[in-house]
Amino acid sequence: MDMKMMWGEVEVRRVVELEAPFLPPAALVPGVPEEVWRANEDWLAPDFWDPGSDRVMAAVQTWVLRSEGRTILVDTGAGNGRERPDAPHFAHLDTDFLARLAAAGVRPEDVDIVVNTHLHADHVGWNTRAGDGGWVPTFPNATYFMPAADHAHFGPRGADGESRDPVFADSVAPVDRAGQTLLWSGTHRIDAHLTLEAAPGHTPGSSVLRLASGTDRAVFVGDLLHTPVQILEPAHSSCLCADPREAAATRVRVLGRAADERELVVPAHFRGAGAAEVRRDGARFAVSRWAA
């Protein structure tokens, strides 16, 4: 678990669920020349890339924010005991995530807000946990903020009103049934320091969470970035993006604002230093410093 940070008046902590090698670079971010990885090996390895196995290194993690007296989780990881036919690396996990969350001073009943930046398996898994008779919300007192576009895209279809997506069925629908879901679109202000903003492309409803408190600025970008190489080569989207062209345009827009307004960029899956300050480098961007 990483140390506590204060960004303005907002307390920020990171709770890691798991870390593992992921796809080869050429598979994860098609089109990025191999020489880009090799030219930046001195800082990409070992946290972001393992040259020996030629695998991108990734983390699944939750950001814990305390703002205006409320406890807010940004994404909830992969969860335990799931059937994931389309993502076997997230199937049947048995991690100590809730114990790690407790070590950060957060009990499930303490959580006021859960933000799902989008509704992929590794961002909603701990929305629920196994209970008597099925899946129940892990955070019984929380309001779960979900992008309306993703909820519509992954949600129920057909006369039976059931979703064909197992992720939606076990990690979203139980929250809906409990009356704890808040759907939003466009922009949505959570409090004086935190604002949600649509950032489509990776999924139809992908979003970012902006933090502005005092002189500090940050943007939690979810899966807008899977690797720092996409900061250097922002035109290249991951193989996991529903609309690669739209994702690239969104990435350039978000990184441009971050560079111009000195926002720390906080992706969902970076190991090691989990946040980056970026600067413009012609039509691309570069990392000027690492934080968190």
Image (cartoon, rainbow, N blue to C red):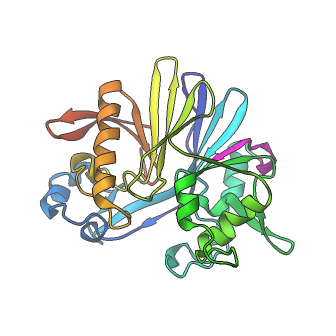
Name the residue nearer the viewer: 244 or 87: 244
* Coordinates of residue 45 in the picture (x, y in percent): 29, 55
Judge by depth and name the residue closer to the eye, 56 or 116.
116
Along the line of sight, the residue nearer the viewer: 172 or 28? 172
Give residue 218's quadrant in the image: top left
Find the residue positioned furthest to the front: 159
Q: Is residue 189 left or right of residue 111?
A: left
Is the residue 20 above or below the residue 114 in the image?
Answer: below
- In which image quadrant can residue 11 be found? top right
Q: Residue at x 67, y 75 (%)?
A: 162
* Residue ID at (78%, 64%): 136
Q: Please name the residue shown 35% across and 70% down the image.
A: 23
Residue 231 is situated, as x and y percent measured from the top left of the image, at 27, 46
In the image shown, does 143 or 42 lie closer to the viewer?
Answer: 143
Relative to 150, 46 lies left or right: left
Camera sees residue 119: no
- Magenta range is 107-114
Residue situated furthest bottom in the rendering: 85
Give the mark count. Answer: 0
Q: Does the magenta run of residues contain 109?
A: yes
Q: Is residue 248 left or right of residue 283?
A: right
Can you give x and y, in whole percent of width and height, for residue 5 in the image?
55, 31
